[in-house]
Image: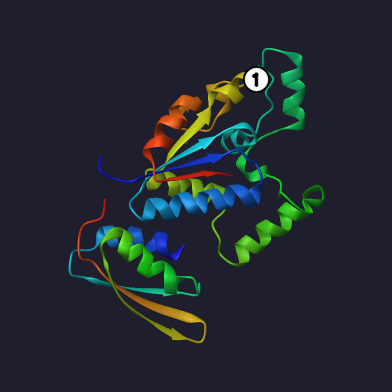
């Protein structure tokens, strides 16, 4: 296609780290780059619907979903989370300083053509399915797909 | 955010037009020239006044 590529692995499910990932992704897209965001492990929480995973194949997975609810508006802070106070304060500061929320950032990313991929390995072990995810997800794929894009790209980040 | 908004606006503009961007983010002084270099647009300069930055960018070519 001619555009330079950038790939970002979003391993973290922390609000602050995911925000950084989106800012970089959106800015790269604004610079005309072809950006792929590969969400894996905790990063999947960004793409999950905020529901319990009761349809999971085994009981451990069902229990895990109680601990790990998912949903992009429920992400914890990587430091000073303080049982939720950290996230609350960060969201308030973001509002005051007009920094886009994760929901807004995801919308902008989609508008700019950033590809949103969910990792099938993590999906497998967490017992999730396509229904567990928000419609913004473009594809479900594994490490090979990600690496294919990464080797073609000029910028590759692990967040 | 100003860069992303610039990119969006520039897509709607015609070649030859100039965009004035108002920002409070100091980073724009370096970010805008970088964006212009990456996308092939012309960075025309920045006016700094009381924490507000007015940046002028000319559209030289179409954006992808």
Within 10 Å of disc 1 (Cα), the crowding (few <14, some 14-19, many 20+) is few
Q: Looking at the image, which is closer to me, B22 or B31? A: B31
Q: Looking at the image, which is closer to me, A118 or A136? A: A118
Q: Looking at the image, which is closer to me, A144 or A90? A: A144
Q: Residue at x 56, y 61 (%)?
A: A99
Q: Chain of mark 1?
A: A
The coloring applied to the image is rainbow
In the current view of this chain or complex, which residue is farthest to the right?
A82
Q: Image check: A107 left or right of A54?
A: left
Q: Is residue A129 above or below residue B23?
A: above
Q: Is residue A149 shown to the viewer in this render?
A: yes
Please state the horizontal and vertical placement of residue A142, each as a whole percent of the image: 50, 25
Q: Looking at the image, which is closer to me, A152 or A98? A: A152
Please state the horizontal and vertical placement of residue B8, each as a whole percent of the image: 34, 58
Q: Residue at x 41, y 30 (%)?
A: A148
Q: Image check: A52 left or right of A34?
A: right
Please state the horizontal and vertical placement of residue A106, each as a whole percent of the image: 49, 46
Q: Quadrant of residue A54?
A: top right
> What residue is disc 1 on?
A125
As helix, strand or loop, the secondary structure at mark 1 comes to helix
Q: Quadrant of residue A47?
A: top right
Please state the horizontal and vertical placement of residue A107, each as a whole percent of the image: 46, 47
Q: Residue at x 57, y 20 (%)?
A: A129
Q: Image check: A152 left or right of A21?
A: left
Q: Is residue A135 shown to the viewer in this render?
A: no
Q: Is residue A89 above or below residue B47?
A: above
Total labels: the figure holds 1
């Amino acid at each position: 296609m001619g555009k330079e590529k950038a790939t970002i692995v979003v391993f973290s499910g922390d609000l602050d780290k995911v925000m950084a990932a989106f800012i970089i992704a959106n800015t790269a897209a604004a610079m005309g780059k072809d950006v792929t965001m590969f969400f894996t492990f905790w990063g999947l929480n960004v793409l999950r619907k905020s529901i319990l995973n009761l349809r999971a194949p085994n009981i451990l997975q069902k229990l895990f979903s109680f601990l790990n609810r998912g949903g992009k508006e429920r992400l914890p802070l990587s430091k000073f989370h303080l049982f939720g106070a950290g996230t609350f304060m960060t969201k308030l500061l973001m509002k005051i300083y007009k920094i886009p929320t994760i929901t807004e950032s995801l919308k902008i990313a989609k508008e700019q053509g950033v590809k949103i991929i969910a990792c099938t390995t993590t999906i497998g072990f967490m017992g999730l399915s396509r229904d567990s995810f928000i419609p913004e997800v473009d594809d479900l794929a594994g490490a090979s797909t990600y690496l294919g894009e990464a080797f073609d790209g000029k910028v590759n980040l692990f967040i | 955010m100003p860069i992303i908004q610039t990119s969006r606006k520039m897509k709607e503009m015609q070649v030859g037009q100039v965009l004035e961007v108002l920002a409070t983010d100091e980073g724009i002084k370096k970010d805008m020239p970088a964006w212009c270099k990456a996308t092939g647009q012309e960075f025309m300069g920045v006016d700094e006044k009381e924490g507000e930055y007015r940046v002028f960018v000319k559209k030289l070519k179409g954006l992808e």
